[in-house]
Amino acid sequence: MIVEKQVPLQGYNSFGIVAKAHHLVRIRDEADLAALRASAPWAELTRVAAPFVLGGGSNLVITGDVRPLVLKVEIAGRRLMEETPRGWLVEAGAGENWHDFVQWTLEQGWPGLENLALIPGTVGASPVQNIGAYGVELQDRFHSLDAIDLRTGERFTLDAAQCGFGYRDSVFKHVPTDARDFGLGGRALITRVRFWLPKAWKPVLGYADLERKIAETGNTAPDAQTIFDWICAIRRAKLPDPAVIGNAGSFFKNPTVTPDQCADIIARDPKVVHYPMPDGTVKLAAGWLIDACGWKGRGVGNAGVYDKQALVLVNRGGATGGEVVTLAKAIQTSVYERFGIRLEPEPVVI
């Protein structure tokens, strides 16, 4: 266990923002964290602020050098834990690359995660955000996870109900307000995540982009690998590669409104993209709202709105976290003034 000092973070955040971690420790297994907590530096480095857990840095905006101790999660490993007549229980270390893990499950003949292809980040970060795309959310395939309480060092396991999943939300995004609150924000380090993949697989195809692929190819019954390939192609056409253009993927959550609110917006903007939800609410496409306000291709300083997808903010070269945040706030103001809707950012700002 080595405490590294003044570690450049530009390569550890997909926005490519230049910053440093004052202190960083790489956690490659549970023993690393136990050794760190038993060391003298732990008490000193966590006296003022809780440590910051860093996965793939794909959902992060860094606004300056990071003073809290950074725990870089690099726990590896993939395995089939159990196979039954009903399905497969698969586990991955929190430091595994998410997309590589999805691809690996398909190579093993275990479908179910294909709609979540090419989402950036690590396996350990996936339940924090309850990642989702093209009609599937992580909670639909989630089984359980292991984590360590950073305050006590105790290991614990959570099932789906205990994770409190919501739309791009989980118990890991909420800081407890009192002793009865189970919020785990800033308190837990996820070590391993397990997924249940049923053998009674059914394709999830209810999205316009996938329907277009069906129409283009004439393939009305695609298998999981085909869906995976389609989604990779769709995402690559819409979203910039972080290795080429710094970004954090979709920057804002798609807002939900009541049917009456949606009807009011449609009366003023008939072309608004919207999706009725099972609970009776209506989800609006945040990218469309931003584009309607004229932000596509515009920017603040070196931070800009991607010219092919208004939901994505990009680093045009040398952008600071402050420029990204300023741009995001300007977009929020525009959307609220025109539509009366407050957009909520997805990335964590530190």
Image (cartoon, grey):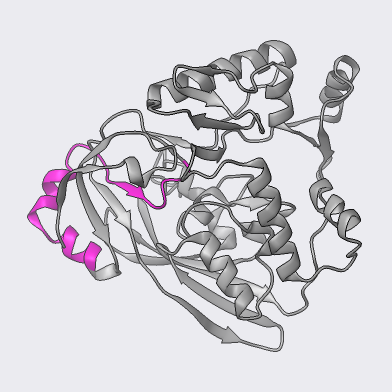
Q: Quadrant of residue 107?
A: bottom right
The reply to whether the magenta stretch includes residue 132 is: no
Start-end of magenta stretch: 32-59
Which residue is nearer to you in this view: 251 or 216?
A: 216
Q: Residue at x 71, y 16 (%)?
A: 340
Q: Residue 228, image x and y in percent? A: 69, 63
Q: Residue at x 83, y 26 (%)?
A: 272
* 3 displayed left or right of 51: left
Q: How many marks?
A: 0
For the N terminus, the image quarter is bottom left
Q: Residue 45, image x and y in percent? A: 16, 44
* 344 displayed left or right of 289: left
Which residue is nearer to you in this view: 323 or 185?
A: 323
Q: Residue 304, image x and y in percent? A: 53, 24
* 261 displayed left or right of 316: right
Q: Quadrant of residue 114?
A: bottom right
Q: Is residue 2 above or below residue 261?
A: below
Q: Is residue 264 above or below residue 12?
A: above
Q: Residue 226, image x and y in percent? A: 75, 66
* 16 displayed left or right of 335: left
For the C terminus, the image quarter is top left
Residue 278 visible (yes or no): no
Residue 48 visible (yes or no): yes
Q: Quadrant of residue 280?
A: top right
Q: Residue at x 78, y 78 (%)?
A: 200
